[in-house]
Image (cartoon, rainbow, N blue to C red):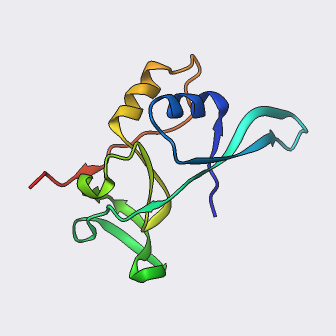
Amino acid sequence: SIVPVFSQALIAVLERAGTDNLQRYGAVLRNSFGDAWSGYSAVNVIGLVDCAVMDQCEYNVIANGPAGIPLVSFKKLVIDPARAMGLPLLRVAQEPSRLLIHDSLVSALKASKPSDGWGINIVPVLEIPPA
């Protein structure tokens, strides 16, 4: 299982921008040479959201998941914004290791970007148009 690790600075920006569903566990990062970095947390984004519009997505099925929701690896992800409920940060039910962030968080991250960057890649996803 993949456990995201965020810097305390990143967590502070996310929380100031309205994220309130993070469980944090202090972490010290170490490399094979014995160097260590503190100021990080392993993070669990609480909750899974079934917001993928599966008939418009492209994916590989990994396994049958709980409650009839398959576990997949998305090649193309299309979400229903209404089902994402405006949450600033969420995990996709069908691919729990995939984190989605709201445009408001993208703006907050860009406004507070450190000189060496955040070390994350933000890739836009497709949304179905509102009805």
Residue drawn at x 46%, y 27% as measured from the top left: 109
Q: Is residue 77 visible?
A: yes
Q: In x, y percent, where is residue 96?
A: 50, 62
Q: In which quarter of the image is residue 70?
A: bottom left
Residue at image position (83%, 41%) is 30
Residue 87: x and y in percent read 38, 47
Q: Which residue lies furthest to the top in this view?
A: 115
Quarter of the N terminus within the rendering:
bottom right
Left or right: 131 as drawn, with respect to 34? left
Of the 4 image quadrants, the one containing the C terminus is bottom left
Residue furthest to the right: 34
Is 59 on the left or on the right of 29, as rendered? left
Residue 17 x/y as whole percent:
45, 30
Percent of width and height locating residue 16:
50, 28
* Snapshot quadrant of residue 27: top right
Would you place residue 51 above or below residue 111 in this image?
below
The single residue placed furthest to the left in the displayed view is 131
